[in-house]
Image (cartoon, grey):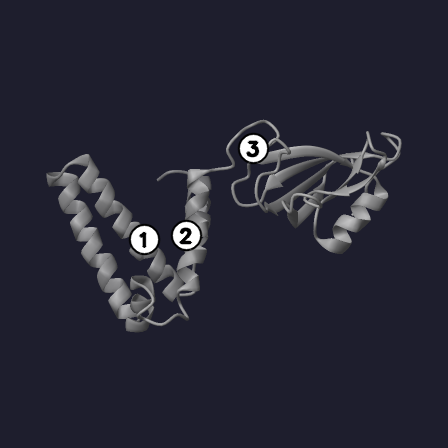
Amino acid sequence: MKLDFDKMEGLVPVIVQDAQTLVVLMLGFMNEEAYNKTVETGKVTFFSRTKKRLWTKGETSGNFLNVVSMKVDCDNDTLLVKVNPVGPVCHTGTDTCWGEDNVSDMNFLPYLQSFIEERKGESPDASYTASLFRDGLNRMAQMVGEEAVDTVIKATNGTDEEFVNEASDLLFHLMVLLSGKNLRIEDLVKELKARHKKPLD
């Protein structure tokens, strides 16, 4: 990665984004030493323009920014760092330096998929999800079928609340089946995106 530290007298702006929710958390600056330390440690380190020294985010609070990926922009003078934050990011105690909540409902699905996958190796007594993995693909597929029928029934002869509940059960069991097939919800998203790019019949 080639960064141009000369444009801003040895500094580059750093946009920090949550790797899961894609919410922008903060903006900081790095010099070359801070960049190298970030690469070395896997924790975001900035250069403080007021204190004139390096500081690793979380060095006093414990709220580290664990690096997931780093990308340089088209002019090689700005860095985008995607992270998994540990706790609030702002020194005021808020999730972001703009006072926003670091949440995104749609990004809950990949989190849930990972949570489901963690249940694969657990004892069937530990959870309902673990018991589905014990029972195997046929049972998982059966549950998807049963929940699909329940969803259709509530869509045509139920309240909106009942329909949402059954549709949620359907999606959950579909995600369990995906994990049973060593697939993820993201694989469905990729397929839908590919279809969306094609002309409609």
Task: Tell whether label 2 touches label 1 (CB within 8 Å).
Answer: yes
Front one among 198 and 44: 44
The quarter of the picture where the C terminus appears is top left
Residue that label 1 marks: 172
Residue at figure coordinates x 59%, y 34% from the top left: 24
124 lies above or below 45: below
Cα gap from disc 3 to disc 1, whole angstroms: 31 Å
Which of the 4 quarters of the picture holds residue 184? bottom left
Which sits earlier in the primary sequence, circle 3 or circle 1?
3
User: Disc 1 marks which amino acid?
Assistant: Phe
The x and y percentages for residue 155 are 17, 40
Which is nearer the N-term, disc 3 or disc 2? Answer: 3
* Residue at position x 15%, y 36% in the image: 159
Whichever of callouts 1 and 2 sits on the residue coming sooner in the sequence is 2
Q: Which residue lies furthest to the left in this view?
A: 157
Query: Residue 35 placed where, x, y %?
Result: 79, 45
Question: Neighbour class for label 2 at 10 Å: few (<14), some, many (≥20)?
Answer: some
> Given the image, on which type of amino acid does mark 2 rest?
Leu
User: Residue 59 appears at what percent x and percent y?
Assistant: 71, 46
Residue 94: mark: 3
Give the mark count. 3
